[in-house]
Image: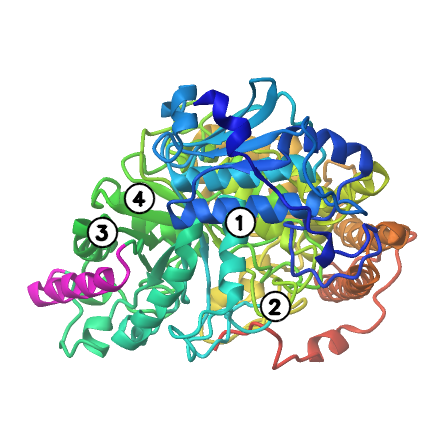
Amino acid sequence: MLKSVARTISVVGIGCALLTAASAAQAEDGYDLWLRYRPVETAWRARYRAEAAALVGATPSPQLAAVRTELQHGLDGLLAETVPATQSAPSEGAVVFGTPASSPLIAQLNLPLQPLGPEGYLIRSVVIQGRHVTVIAANSDIGVLYGAFRFLRQIQTRQPLDRLDIADAPKVKLRLLNHWDNLDRTIERGYAGASLWDWQKLPDYLDPRYTDYARADASIGINGTVLNNVNAKAESLTPLFLRRAAGLADAFRPYGVRVYLSARFTAPIEIGGLKTADPLDPQVKAWWRAKADEIYALIPDFGGFVVKANSEGEPGPQDYHRTHADGANALAQAVAPHHGVVMYRAFVYSQDVPDDRAKQAYAEFKPLDGQFDANVIVQVKNGAIDFQPREPFHPLFGAMPRTPLMMEFQITKEYLGFSTHLVYLAPLFEETLRSDTYAKGPGSTVAKVVDGELDGHALTGMAGVANTGTDRNWSGSIFDQANWYAFGRLAWDPTASSREIAQDWTRMTFSNDPAFVRPVVGMMMGSREAAVDYMTPLGLHHQMARSSHYGPGPWVAGGPRPDWTSVYFNKADDKGIGFDRTATGSDAVAQYTSQAVKAFDDPANQDRFLLWFHHVSWDARTTSGRTLWDEMVARYSRGVSETADMGATWAGLGAYVDPERFAQTATFLRIQEKEARWWRDACIAYFQTFSKRPLPTGYAAPEHPLAYYEGLQFPFAAGTAH
């Protein structure tokens, strides 16, 4: 069989007809994301063709058909020549792909696939009968697809192919995007147009964009998508919408992306005709079992439910004097016969305002550790407040050893400038994942909680609140694509490097030229810290405008709940600023291990979380030697300067980028600098009314008086909840 490789090779056509000449200035709109298969340089082309000019592999399944299509498309584009080649030269190599079950050749190679599990893959360079062969093999067809995308990434980032020996498998089982999409196609906290899901045309018309969405997800290892908003409508579970969801499941299935639905807790009342949604009521349990059976009849590989309950006014088990475990288990028992899961969100706070909202989730969920069914995973936000520019890790991580915990990050930038601010979020994700809970001594990182290593859980997960929409560039801006990409890479491997991910994304999205890659990656890696500086320095948090969260609002007070206001969190007064969460205040620090608390107070971290945990005098000395007031002014100002520097850096890179993407990014960076200055000036003007201290020498006063900033209103800002 090994001798027949040369006879069975199917030559890859080099399809230049659809490509313009290779050029850094080729017009683009961002639709291709990081899957830009543009021709490589001449020197690289010869090297790659020697290893990968042809394909060998059966396609007995939709997944393997997708593998062949992707490899064909990728190699056609990447290995294209100015003058098309008529056929492969004898010295050119082949790519053999498949599983031992689908490929007798791979079966005979006896590769070490068993440790890679159901989704891992192996990419190995071998020589058969004098011919260079790259093998992409896995235990499952979807594993082969993941391997194909990894192989193409090697070419996109100009890595050698001649000595490949890559074995990789995901460290997290559920790697999901949560779409906060409503049935009317609006998106809560969406900044890239309308929802991708055209419910009115489904299931009869499957927009080709659904396939491209699934391709993008699969290319970074995402294997699930929650179609509807966590603030769910019961109608999402009616037969009409279930049939439409089944159409999306059909489109996604070849790429290994399973669909999930957010379930409204009171659906048994609203669409089921029952008088109660009490999770312990036998009729309610029977209703959920019947509903699960109905869903799985339409979508055999349905993943399960996400549940938001007893939070922000949403109904839940506490309405019936039941626990969150009672509520989660009722739905879990309904999907368990079908091997489904329930992801039960820990973002909760009761109708009664607590002394500190940061303590709410821990107080409600910690006592329930070990009471959830085996197919329940509790979904916990990275921090205890709400996706702030910087938060300490959520105290539940490491505190529930008998319960699987699923990380929830926000990819859409609700608190970080929407789609116009360049804020690369992977450093935020990485900062959280590498935080040490000390739950079982040093090294008990959040990443080890999430991937199950710390407590031995097999059910693991990571969810990201999606930033996609109908904008041609998918996410509202080119650089916001990097956050989708980085989330997928970190969900696959929570220990991955945010810098290395940024390098790969930059090379795949723009250019491999080091003169471009170095400054752009530098911009990306510093962008989150710049945003923290001009928005919420030194541990401040929740200082945005009411409702829309667009722009600064440190003066926001009143309304339905104190803990929906900025003044609740900044506690600014004549003496100082910051939320005292020590033993003399709310004592939220008691929810962390003593070693973690020491880490928060370490000088290296103190500035990061100073005002998160302490109410500090305006004249207190910070680690820089400045007073707190002077340090705040310096931080706000530094954020503006760093944003201006990003714009200046980008302005010098036009030769490497097509005019369309270059111009949009340049415009957005100007917007970001303007809005960073707005944040700086508004916050300084407000907090100065308490500090009553002059600005330090060399720092400009706010451009307008405080009343001007307080009077700004944006009633139709994008992504506003409704």
- Disc 2, SS: loop
Residue 422: mark: none
> What residue is shown with label 4?
366
Q: CA distance from mark 2 to mark 3?
A: 36 Å
- For the residues carrying marks 2 and 3, which lies nearer the camera in this image? 2
Which image quadrant is residue 269 in? bottom left
Three-letter code for the amino acid on which mark 1 is drawn = Thr
| Residue 688 in the image: above or below residue 42 | below
Three-letter code for the amino acid on which mark 2 is drawn = Ala
Q: CA distance from mark 1 to mark 2?
A: 28 Å
Q: Earlier in the sequence, mark 1 or mark 2?
A: 1
- For the residues carrying marks 4 and 3, which lies nearer the camera in this image? 3
Residue 647 visible, this angle = yes
Q: CA distance from mark 1 to mark 4?
A: 48 Å
Residue 69: mark: 1
Dots 4, 3 in contact, CB < 8 A:
no
Q: Earlier in the sequence, mark 2 or mark 3?
A: 2
**540 in the magenta segment:** no
Q: From the viewer's perspective, is 232 left or right of 322?
A: right
Q: CA distance from mark 1 to mark 3?
A: 45 Å
Front one among 572 and 70: 70
List x then y, in percent, for residue 279.
16, 62
